[in-house]
Each structure stands twice: as C-alpha cells, then as structure tokens.
Amino acid sequence: MFKQVNINKINISIDFLNNGSIMKPWRVISMAYKIITKCPVCSSKLIVTKLKCKKCGTVIENDFELSKFSYLTMEQLNFIEVFIKCRGNIKDVEKELGISYPTVRGKLEDVIASFGYTQIKEKEDNSADVIDKLENGEITAEEALDLLRK
C-alpha cells in the first residue's frame, strides 16, 4: 500500500506492508520551489538576500550571488546534464536526445551565450576553394600551401 501526505508544503511518500507497518523510510519527493531568477515585473536578474537554517532558525541577510547555472532554463539544464553525461561527445548527445548535429551545436551555443560568453567564429574550411583555384591555375602551389596553413 502506498500513501502520499503533504506536511508544510513537503510531499512525503510512504510505502506500507499489508499489515500497515512502514516498509521503507520516508522519501521526500519535492521539498521546495525552484528559485526564480528573473523579476516577474521587469525581467531583471534577481539576487538572493536571505538565507535561513531549517534546523536552528539562524537567518543571514546579505546580497548573495547565484551560480550561472541558476539562470539557465530547465531545457538548458537538461541539455547540459546530457552533454556532461556524454562527456562532451556531440555524436553521443545526438543519439541520446535524438536530434541532429547542428541542433546540438545550436543548443550548446545557446547555453554558452546564456553564460555571457561571446560566440567564437569558427575558422572556415576553405580548402576546397583553394584546391579549385590551384586546379584552375589561379594560384601557385606555394600560394595554395600558404592559404591552407592559415
């Protein structure tokens, strides 16, 4: 028999044996609300100003910084979890999430931008253009090597 109770906004699940005794210790399903990180009025970033000990009631008030991860959406956090689980291997992330390589790259760039980092322009692969120019006699072999090294 399974029973769920709500005590002070904390959901507790209890498993009972047929005779009514508790089979497993209490398990907390959800304890608190997810912290909001943006102001509902103006969408600016919020800061934490109060911390409280649940055991003794000690309260500390100050301006506390949140982690950059706190400002990510749930979708971004789930993506990052899969990305880390796959040890950064984009092919494995593709398989795990069932999405294409460009979509994985796009999601990764989105997270990087959310952290406040600027996007790094990838070096264009112009080797095919250089080879075409070499074959057409537009450039010399030496010039082609110089272009490919850049």
Image (spheres, rainbow, N blue to C red):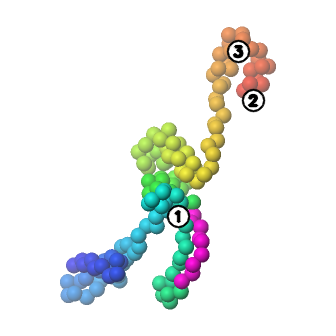
Q: Of 21 and 104, which appears nearest the observer?
A: 104
> Residue 130 sits in which quadrant?
top right
Task: Tell me which corner region of the image, top left, top right, bottom left or bottom right, holds residue 144.
Answer: top right
Q: Vertically, is 71 above or below 53?
A: above
**Residue 22, percent across and down?**
28, 86
Query: Which residue is pictured at 24% across the width and 78% down the height?
Result: 3
Which amino acid is tagged 1? Answer: Leu
Name the residue: 49% across, 60% down: 38
Q: Residue furthest left?
A: 18
Query: On screen, 12 above or below 77?
Result: below
Q: Amino acid at mark 3?
A: Leu
Image quarter in which the C terminus is found: top right
For the residues bearing labels 2 and 1, Cβ distance under 8 angstroms: no
On the image, the x and y values in percent for residue 61 come to: 57, 78
Q: Give the crowd class for mark 1: few <14, some 14-19, many >=20 residues within 10 Å.
A: some
Q: Is residue 63 above or below residue 140?
A: below
Q: Magenta span covers which residues?
A: 59-67
Mark 2 lies on residue: 149
* Element marked by disc 2: helix
Splitting the image into 4 quarters, where does residue 40 fall?
A: bottom left
Q: Which residue is mark 3?
A: 134
Q: CA distance from mark 2 to mark 1?
A: 48 Å
Give the spatial CA distance, label 1 vs label 3.
58 Å
Q: Closer to the N terminus: mark 1 or mark 3?
A: 1
Q: Is residue 108 visible?
A: no
Name which residue lies at 58% across and 54% down.
Answer: 115
In the image, 56 versus 28, the foreground residue is 56
* Tag 1–tag 3 contact (CB < 8 Å): no
Of discs 1 and 3, which sits in the foreground? 1
- Tag 1 residue: 46
- Three-letter amino acid code of the residue under disc 2: Arg
- Between disc 3 and disc 2, whose residue precedes? 3
